[in-house]
Amino acid sequence: MSETRPKPQAWPHYVDPEPWSPDDDAPHASRLDPGASAARLMLKRFLRHRLAVLAALFLGFSYLSLPFVNFLVPHGANERDVEHLYAPPQAIHLFHEGQFIGPFVYPTTGRADLREYRWRYESDTTRPLPLRFLCPGEPYRFLGLVEARLRLVCPPPGGSLHLLGTDRLGRDVLSRLAIGAQLSLTVGLLGIAVSFTIGVTLGGLAGYLGGWVDAGVQRLSEILKSLPELPLWLALSAAVPAHWSPVTVFLCISVILGLLDWPSLARAVRSRFLALREEDFVMAAELMGASPARIIRRHLLPNFASHLLASATLSIPAMILGETALSFLGLGLRPPATSWGVMLNDAQNLMAVETYPWISAPMIPVILVVLSFNFLGDGLRDALDPYHDQ
């Protein structure tokens, strides 16, 4: 006699009649947003990387201010104040004896301390000297084209204005830092232009064509990567004639840095193209009669653009550090050119650094710029990665 099994009980459930819509506060909502464009999703991912956003703002402000640095700083790059050699940083005050009189400085006088062999400065706190704004100063060429003399702020008559002190020749450190950024920051852009042109061209041809082209590019990149980098930089920089103009030396240094930096990028482009050339859209383009140059330019490179952009932001700091190292060793840019490496060349005297530590101030912008480019590169890499967590 068989038992009768009870029928399974139906569980109660509720069906919401309203259409489903993604929650904007959900962590993965942007992936499920059918109306968001690819650019908007990338921007949202980038804005979540706070360090990358701060780095982008800092770098954007730095590069946008480069054409106007001569107007913003109070002194020229090689303008000397012979009465303030190795002067310490000077403060700007607003109140004098409890009364607001606007931005002003106190006059300082220096004397040589023959016991400790150093300069000592004393401020006269009874004589406030108001600063001048929008005043004429040492002439400069605005945007390299028009001669101008107008400056945002100038030292008061009978006083000085050295916010970061002066060097051994009495030159203002802050003004030289700002003007030196024009060379130190642009050398990375020119070097990257040379490096990317060579790396993308040779790497793309090696990855797409293969055969003897691939073998030749691989052997050439291996030879360059096997050479010690710093001695090679020194040898090529030493070959630049010393009598060339600063602009010509700057261009040569940029080309040298770019010529030695392309092998890593070429190998990355090659490995990516080896995988992409087997895709169906490449085969379809070949069957339609597209030339190899068109396939690389219109079909392969756009699929690799995100990696190229991130690689560029991570390679520029290496260019800046390369120029700084060469100029620090006296084999890169030379006076009267002004760059952060040229300024750090004065910091080789350890006794001077110990006595006057403000002459090593160029280390601060170098560190900030390198860290900013690294943070920006990390943010762009995460934003351009479609598989990164939203």
Image: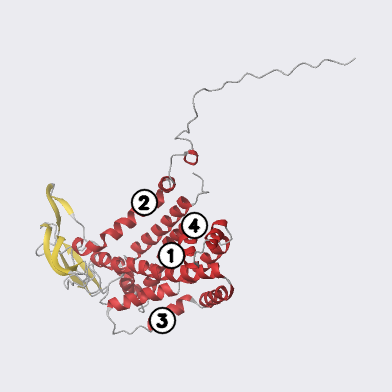
Q: Secondary structure at mark 2?
A: helix
Q: Image quarter for residue 241?
A: bottom left
Please give the label number shown on residue 158.
none
Q: Nearer the viewer, mark 3 or mark 4?
A: 4
Residues under labels 3 and 4: Cα distance? 36 Å
Question: Which residue is identified by label 1?
Answer: 315
Q: Height in image: 106 above or below 389?
A: below
Q: Which one is earlier in the sequence, the residue at label 3 or at label 4? A: 3
Q: Nearer the viewer, mark 4 or mark 1?
A: 4
Residues under labels 2 and 4: Cα distance? 28 Å
Direction front: furthest residue: 288
The quadrant the N terminus occupies is: top right
Q: Which one is earlier in the sequence, the residue at label 2 or at label 4? A: 2
Please give the label number shown on residue 236.
3
Dots 2, 4 in contact, CB < 8 A: no
Q: Identify the amino acid type marked 2.
A: Leu
On screen, residue 172 versus residue 148, left or right, reads right
Determine crowd level at label 1: few under 14, some 14-19, many 20+ residues with C-alpha closer than 10 A: many
Residues under labels 3 and 1: Cα distance? 20 Å
Residues under labels 2 and 3: Cα distance? 37 Å
Determine crowd level at label 2: few under 14, some 14-19, many 20+ residues with C-alpha closer than 10 A: some
Q: Which one is earlier in the sequence, the residue at label 4 or at label 1? A: 4
x and y, in percent, of residue 163 in the image: 22, 61
Q: As rendered, which of 62 and 195 lies closer to the eye?
A: 195
Residues under labels 2 and 1: Cα distance? 19 Å
Q: Residue at x 51, y 70 (%)?
A: 205
Looking at the image, can residue 246 be seen?
Answer: yes
Question: Which residue is identified by label 2?
Answer: 54
